[in-house]
Each structure stands twice: as structure tokens, then as C-alpha cells.
Amino acid sequence: MCGIVGYIGSEQAAPILLDGLTRLEYRGYDSAGVSIHDGHKLNVIKTKGRLRILSDMIDGGNSVHGVSGIGHTRWATHGKPSNENSHPHVSNSGNIAVVHNGIIENYLQLREFLTSRGVKFNSETDTEVVAQLVDYYYDGDLLKAVHRAIDRIEGSYALGIMAAYYPDMIVAACKDSPLIAALSEKGNFIASDVTAVLKHTRDVIYLEDGEYAVLTPESVDVFDSFLEPVEKAVSHIDWDISSAEKGGYEHFMFKEIMEQPEVIRKTMAPRIRNRKVILDDIQLSKEYIKGINKIYIVACGSSYHVGMVAKYNIEKLARKPVEVALASEFRYCTPIVDEKTLVVCISQSGTTADTIAAMREAKRLGGRVLSIVNVVGSTIAKESDDVIYTWAGPEIAVATTKAYSTQLAVTYLLSIYLADCCGTINADEYERLVGELLTIPDKIECILKDKEHIQYLASLYFNNRDIFFIGRNIDYALSLEGSLKLKEISYIHSDAYAAGELKHGTISLVEDGTLVIAAATYQRLLEKTISNIVEVKARAAQVLSVTTESGKGLVAQVSDNMMVIPDIDELFLPSLAVVPMQLFAYYVALLRGCDIDKPRNLAKSVTVE
Ligand code: F6R
């Protein structure tokens, strides 16, 4: 959470920082601020609220002059959103300014230490101790002062630091929080994410844990944790800024829903050659795969829901036991992991703190980690034994759609690949499945063409107070995602249940008019699901079903309304069925006037535990 950007060069810094922060707002948006060096001193302007308030305060950056600066957009952890708690934080002397992403775990001890030496604190944040500590240790060398301060810090951080004494220097450092440096003709940058700098350059350096970067207008020098110089490779980003812009759509979420056929093609096409699943990305030998005793899938939120689908599919195809764990629980549940355990970490951002912690625990226990990640070069991608990138491109809306869909696509490829290695599917079945897999993008296109129908359905139900999702097997996994999508952007209370479970308690909440969204795509259990639908209908619920062309005849008899998807092999149904659910959530949120791309209390990249 929190977005950092810094610029030092020949142009006015404030407009560049504001533009960069706009692209990082998905990381947090409860307050924002910049610190600009005017050649003599640091000027700090910060405020509670959205970035546009800051932008208005400084006339789009035109009223603050200076060619170097750091900026921040915040997702509050320590201390409520307020002007005082906004970043940059400045030391008492006004000489050190700091922007920070992460959590300083021992900030209370450090605060006590500094207070006992006469330092006065102005905010409730953990970050302020960094500014005060750097100032405390400063004796003429900024990098050394930062190094001494960091030596005393426990926790996670990506830091951008400026000092009044150095108009032409920014110092950056990171541990367990992403940070890049970027180079261009007109100056150099730091940022939490490449999207913040893409307008200016595609040449970036990924900073590793424990590294420091010193930026001047002409250079970026990187040092290791002992302040020894490090040679870093410059990576060239090959997607351009348009992928991170709305391209005429009203919301990023809608744009990203519409992009799904294309990004799924991009994810699958290079990995299916001559109708064979080729996973060049990974180094798992056939012997290793055959010998796997258990697969753990570890993830959070929607990525966890992908894991739920993957469990059903891998167990069905490859006949290996799969356990799906929430990353925040995994490390505290004494997981049984050894060298024959494959731990699959799924993460769009690759920076989710809980998933990182789970991945490290899995490695510590001797497991082999295969990650499915969207953001190239992110922490999870870098630290995993193997990584399969989802290639969804930048996902900006906080609620995931296209990343979820490409994650699903990768798990399908993986399921077939594992099954092939284990010899648990025959050649005909293999060929049939690969053929079916390739039909997903076109079938999603068909569903998207019918979006007006889903918009109409949203208009019938957008005023509901509680909505329940039910489904069995992969329809249950799908229901979890449908429910999360709806509640996170529309703020309607919603829960998902395994359809057979409802009668064990929750059905008491169903009353006249309660909306139940029934995922009824899984043909094998259709009759059972229909029985569960009938149970809620008997309590006067309204039922909106998601079903297939071949299921619609039966499902229509027990539903008030339906969203119908094309037929496809049962393994891949969630890829189609999630699309009407995403659209439904989107249109409901639109009708309720919600801030769709930036729902309250959320952030895209959850870098705190
Ligand atoms: C929901 C959503 C979140 C993420 C979760 C994990 O729409 O986006 O639930 O799926 O925070 O994030 P990643 O995949 O980046 O680890």
C-alpha cells in the first residue's frame, strides 16, 4: 500500500510527481503530499483526501518550484487519514523529508529513544521516526545517515529521502516493499511501480531488499547493505503507457473486464504450441512432479478464489492432493511441507505481504515454490523457485478482473501439464481439453456482447441490502469471487456459500425478496444445485442464476432471471461464468454511484500483514 514517486532532473518536479502519483493512486488514496526542493530548502505540501485536492492546492504543481522532489499517496496504517499523518514527514529541523511505504515495526521504541533526546513528534505515524532518526544521525553525509537509521529499523520499507542540504540528491532504500529506480534523459526517478514513470522512460532498475540508491539529475548509483557499490542491470519495459490509461472507458474496471479475451489469449497462446501445453517458464522435472506428495496453493482474496478452482481441477486431472490456504493463515497453521511439497503462490501484484511471508515460510520448510504472478520482477516472482507470469498487463482498478482471469488460465495450463507428467490423462482427453481451453477467449467475447442484458438485471436488483451467492464444486469457488466482486465495489452486504451448506444455518436469513445468485453451471451437480435453489425459492427468495446453454432449460424453471453462458468443458466454466458476475457487480456499483475504481478502505497492493 502507499505509492511513492521521486524525480530529480532538469524539469519542474511537482507536475511530474503529481502525474506519477495519479498512476499510483490505486495503492492508497486517503491522503497525498509532495516535498519539493527549491534550491534552498524543502517545501512540503500535503493534505488528507484524494490527490486532486493536493493538485488543486498547488495548481497542478505549477505553484511550487524546484527540479527535485518526492511524493506520496497514502493508505493509512498508523494513524487515521489526516493532514498531520500524510507524507512526506519532516524532521523537527525541517531538513529531512521522507516518504515511506511499509511498516516500521519497532517505531514505538524508536520514538521513545528519540523523545528522550528531545525530539518532538508531529504525527501518529511510524514513518515519522525515519525522518527524525535520519536527522539525528546526520553529520554531513546523507547516505551514511540513512544507513545508520535503517540499521535501527525493523519492518518493511520503501523509502524516498531528501535533505535540505542536498538540492540535487534523493536517497532511496527498500526491504520487503517494492521500489524501482528509473533513468531518462531529462532526469531520474524512484517509484513504487513502473506505471508511475512510464510516461517518461521505460528503463528501470529493480531495487532488491537491503539496497540503497542515490539519485542525482545525471546518475543512479546503487549500493548494497554495506554501502558497497552494486552493478545493476537496467530492464526495459515493453508495454506502454496506453495499457495503464482508460482508453475512452469510464472506469478502469470496465476496461479491464473488456480486455479479458485479449489478455487470456496473450497468456495462453505462447504456452500452447502444436496443441501441446509447453511451460518453458518452469524447471520442474517430470520426476519431481510425479513425486509430489501434496500441493499447497497459497494466496489472498481473489487470487485465493483462483486457488479454489485450481484445487478442483488439479485433483481431478493430476490426482495430487491439493490444499488451498489463505496466505495470512498458512504460516500460523504449522503447515506440513517438505521437499516433495509444491507450494503454488498466486498473486497479481507479487507484493502482497501475507503471500510473501507464506512463500518464505514454505521455502524455509523445504517446499518448492512456484508462483503465478502478474507484475514482472515483483518480490514473489523474484524469490520463487519458478514463476509463471500471467501477462495481463497493468491492472489499475482495485477490484481485480483480468488478472483473476489470466490466473485462472495459468492454473488450467498447469493442471493439464501436471496431469500429463503424472500420466493421469490419456492423449484424447489431453487433446480435447487443450482444444476447449483455446475457445475461452471467443466465448468470453460472446458474453461481453450481451452486457446490456446484465445491465438491465443490475437495474432490478441494485437496491438489495443483502445478497447471497450459492454454488457447488467449482460453482462454489466462482460464487466466492462473484460475492467479493459485488461487495467490494457496491458496498452491498454479500456472502457466498456452498449451496448444500445454506440449510445448515444461513437459510434463516433468507426472507421475502432476498436475492440469491445461484451459480448453476456445473452440469454434474446441476440437479443438486436446483434442489438448493428450490429451497430458497420456498422461502420467497428472488433467484438470479448463472447457467450454461445446456443447463438453462432446467434452471429457468426455478429462477426469476438468468445470465446464460456458452457451454464449455466443466473444468473451464469459471472463466466464462465469472464475466457476467463481474459485469453485474460493475453495473450495480455504477447505479449506486460508487467510486468503482477506488472503493473505500481498499488498496490494490496490500503490503501490510
Ligand atoms: C479483489 C482483489 C483482492 C486481491 C488480493 C490479493 O478484487 O483484488 O482480493 O486479489 O488482495 O492480491 P494479489 O493477487 O496482488 O496478491
Image: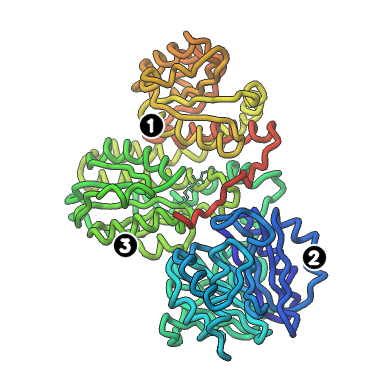
Is residue 396 among what the camera can see? yes
- Residue at 39% of width from left, 58% of height from top? 356
Which residue is label 1 attached to? 474
- Residue at 74% of width from left, 84% of height from top? 39
Tags 1 and 2 in contact by the CB under 8 Å rule? no
Q: Amino acid at mark 2?
A: Ile
x and y percentages locating residue 176 in the rendered image = 44, 65
Which residue is label 3 attached to? 385
Say whether residue 547 is left or right of residue 197. Answer: left
x and y percentages locating residue 310 in the rendered image = 35, 41
Q: Nearer the viewer, mark 3 or mark 2?
A: 2
Above/below status of 486 relative to 273: above
Q: Nearer the viewer, residue 412 or 245?
A: 245
Q: Amino acid at mark 3?
A: Asp
Ligand 1 within 8 Å of disc 3? The answer is: no
Q: Nearer the viewer, residue 186 or 328?
A: 328
Above/below status of 240 relative to 606: below
Say whether residue 295 is left or right of residue 438. Answer: left
Q: Secondary structure at mark 3?
A: loop
Q: Quadrant of the C terminus?
A: bottom left
Which residue is label 2 attached to? 58
Ligand 1 within 8 Å of disc 2? The answer is: no
Distance in Å between CA atoms under marks 3 and 2: 47 Å
| Marks 3 and 2, the one that precedes in the sequence | 2
| Marks 1 and 2, the one that precedes in the sequence | 2
Q: Amino acid at mark 1?
A: Ile
Q: Nearer the viewer, residue 66 or 350?
A: 66
Q: Nearer the viewer, residue 485 or 309?
A: 485
Q: Nearer the viewer, mark 1 or mark 2?
A: 2
Distance in Å between CA atoms under marks 1 and 3: 28 Å
Above/below status of 382 relative to 518: below
